[in-house]
Amino acid sequence: MAKLTDRQKRREIVSLEESPVSRALFADVRWSWIWLFVRLYVGLTWLQSGLGKLNNPAWTGNEAGRALTGFIQGALAQTGGQNPQVQGWYAWFLENLVLPNAALWGRVVAAGETLVGAALILGMFTGIAAFFAAFMNVNFLLAGAVSLNPILLLLSILLILAWRTAGWWGVDRWLLPALGTPWRPGLIFRDEPRPETPVQDRRTTVT
């Protein structure tokens, strides 16, 4: 039994090799043009929706909250039956936390949609923008609104998976190397300059 315990202690973490398809789609910049079209579609959809709300008095003007109140009331009407479209816990959240502050939340939704759309179009913080896009899609779905939300949610998840290369044709091409990640500091946070990689060893994949 002691030998088994020692063996378990010495056991190394197994790292499974990534498939060529997923590596090409999510880490190879030669395929990053695919994500440019996905980004533009998702980004333009959110930007158009957000700007429409920003210019609508029922969302951000003197009547702020009226549009969101109507949306919430429609969602609360879908809570009946054995298999309701809107689940009870989410209906409680809408009724007790969102509805009393509908004017504030309306402005947050309008600003959030606009910022997410602009970031995706520019390819700036693409992974983060796609995360918040997916978060908004999930909330709309939980509120019983289908429309384009399932499609946008799927595309946003793919953009999150491709965060390393999805913004290659955008601001992230320069922003990500400069800022880096929590596990790899960028150029502006390094104490010492990183040695240049020899030309013959350069890859088209991003880690």
Image (spheres, rainbow, N blue to C red):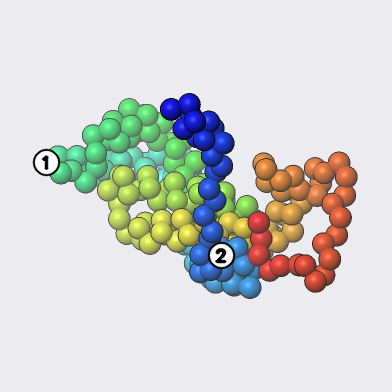
Check disc 1 and report the residue beneath it. Answer: 82
Is 101 left, or right, of 161 in this rendering? left
Disc nearest the viewer among 2 and 1: 2
Type of the residue with mark 2:
Arg
Secondary structure of residue under mark 1: loop
**Residue at the image point whose x is 50% and y is 34% from the top:** 8
Residue depicted at 68% across the width and 46% down the height? 181
Q: Is residue 193 above or below residue 93?
A: below
Determine the residue positioned at 44% across, 41% down.
106
Return the disc, 2 or 1, that comes first in the chain's sequence.
2
The N terminus - image quarter: top left
Percent position of residue 28, x then y: 62, 67
Which residue is at the front of the view, 112 or 151? Answer: 151
In the rendered image, which quarter contains the C terminus?
bottom right
The residue carrying pointer 1 sits among few (fewer than 14), some (14 to 19) or many (20 or more) residues within 10 Å by Cα, namely few
Real-space Cα distance between discs 2 and 1? 44 Å
Q: Can residue 114 be seen from the camera position used here?
A: no
Residue depicted at 15% across the width and 44% down the height = 83
Residue with the mark numbered 2: 23
Q: Assign a secondary structure to mark 2.
A: helix
- Indicate left or right for 139 with 89 as reference: right
Q: Position of residue 40 (x, y in %)?
A: 54, 66
Q: For this rendering, which residue is in front, 176 or 119?
A: 176
Query: Residue 44's spot in the image, x, y percent?
Result: 51, 63
**Does residue 78 sit above or below 207 in this rendering?**
above
At label 2, counting other C-alpha atoms closer than 10 Å, the crowd grade (few under 14, some 14-19, many 20 or more) is: some
In the image shown, does 13 or 164 lie closer to the viewer? 13
Give x and y (percent) for residue 178.
76, 51
Is residue 185 visible from the viewing direction of this image?
Answer: yes
The picture quadrant where one finds residue 24 is bottom right
Q: Residue 29 is drawn in which quadrant?
A: bottom right
Q: What's the amino acid at mark 1?
A: Gln
